[in-house]
């Protein structure tokens, strides 16, 4: 199978069961001159697939096509992972063909979503209102200097302008009592 053919197959969200059977037997539909496996080979391969389903190595996904026929599909990544540990010498895919999914580590920062941002602003605004008795809805926020001084005592540095800006943003999200 050529690189562009592999790429095309790997871009599919699902593979029909019949396609999986052919791929496992080295027949790369529809771009091949190789003869189809005989019916016995197809049945044996289908039994292997059914065994993999029974032991939860493959998850069948059913759908009804336009002709009201039930079709079974599988996720390509799942098929490749399963088949890599089996003896399918003509199967054209290996684990190296699957792009690794990189999970973000705890050290990687991801941007806050709008809801997260709004919740954090509400939290800050609410704590300042309740804990410091500051009216964050006022035209001029009095007492921001006290918060800056208290934060610096525990090693947190923030400029007064930033604090005032965030408190104004919080005021837009919090109903005035």
Image (cartoon, rainbow, N blue to C red):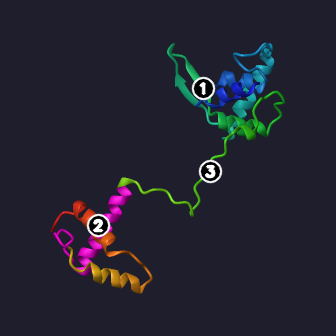
The residue lying toward the viewer, choosing from 41 and 103, is: 103
Counting other residues with Cα less than 10 Å from the Cα at mark 2, is it few (<14), some (14-19), or many (20 or more)? few
Label 3 and label 2: CA atoms lie apart by 36 Å
**Quadrant of the image occupied by residue 123:** bottom left
**Quadrant of the image occupied by residue 40:** top right
Q: Position of residue 117 (x, y in %)?
A: 36, 59
Q: Is residue 25 above or below residue 177?
A: above
Which mark identifies residue 48? none
In this picture, residue 118 sits left or right of residue 106: left
Q: Is residue 56 above or below residue 21?
A: below
The residue lying toward the viewer, choosing from 110 and 116, is: 110
Question: Earlier along the polypeptide chain: callout 3 or callout 2?
Answer: 3
Label 2 and label 1: CA atoms lie apart by 56 Å
In this picture, residue 145 sits left or right of residue 99: left
Query: Which SS class for mark 2?
Result: helix
The residue lying toward the viewer, choosing from 140 and 92, is: 140
Quadrant for the C terminus, please: bottom left
The residue lying toward the viewer, choosing from 116 and 67, is: 116
Instruction: Provide the residue span drawn in magenta.
Output: 115-140
**Residue beneath the point at 60% across and 29% down:** 12
Q: Position of residue 50 (x, y in %)?
A: 69, 31
Q: Which residue is mark 3?
A: 102
Q: Position of residue 56 (x, y in %)?
A: 66, 41
Q: Which residue is mark 2?
A: 165
Magenta stretch: includes residue 103: no
Q: Is residue 70 above or below residue 160?
A: above
Q: Which residue is mark 1?
A: 72
Label 1 and label 3: CA atoms lie apart by 29 Å
Query: Which SS class for mark 1?
Result: strand
Closer to us: mark 2 or mark 1? 2
Question: Earlier along the polypeptide chain: callout 2 or callout 1?
Answer: 1
């Amino acid at each position: 199978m050529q690189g562009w053919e592999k790429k095309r197959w790997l871009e599919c969200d699902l593979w029909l069961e019949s396609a999986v059977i052919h791929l496992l037997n080295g027949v790369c539909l529809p771009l091949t001159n190789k003869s189809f496996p005989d019916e016995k080979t197809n049945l044996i391969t289908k039994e292997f697939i059914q065994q993999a389903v029974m032991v939860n190595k493959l998850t069948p996904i059913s759908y009804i096509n336009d002709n009201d026929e039930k079709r079974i599909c599988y996720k390509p990544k799942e098929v490749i992972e399963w088949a890599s540990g089996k003896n399918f010498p003509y199967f054209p895919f290996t684990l190296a063909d699957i792009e690794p999914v990189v999970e973000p580590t705890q050290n990687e920062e991801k941007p806050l979503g709008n809801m997260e941002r709004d919740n954090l602003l509400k939290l800050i605004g609410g704590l300042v209102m309740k804990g410091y008795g500051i009216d964050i809805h006022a035209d001029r926020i009095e007492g921001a200097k006290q918060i800056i001084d208290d934060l610096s005592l525990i090693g947190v540095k923030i400029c007064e302008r930033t604090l005032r800006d965030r408190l104004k943003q919080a005021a837009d999200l919090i109903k005035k009592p």
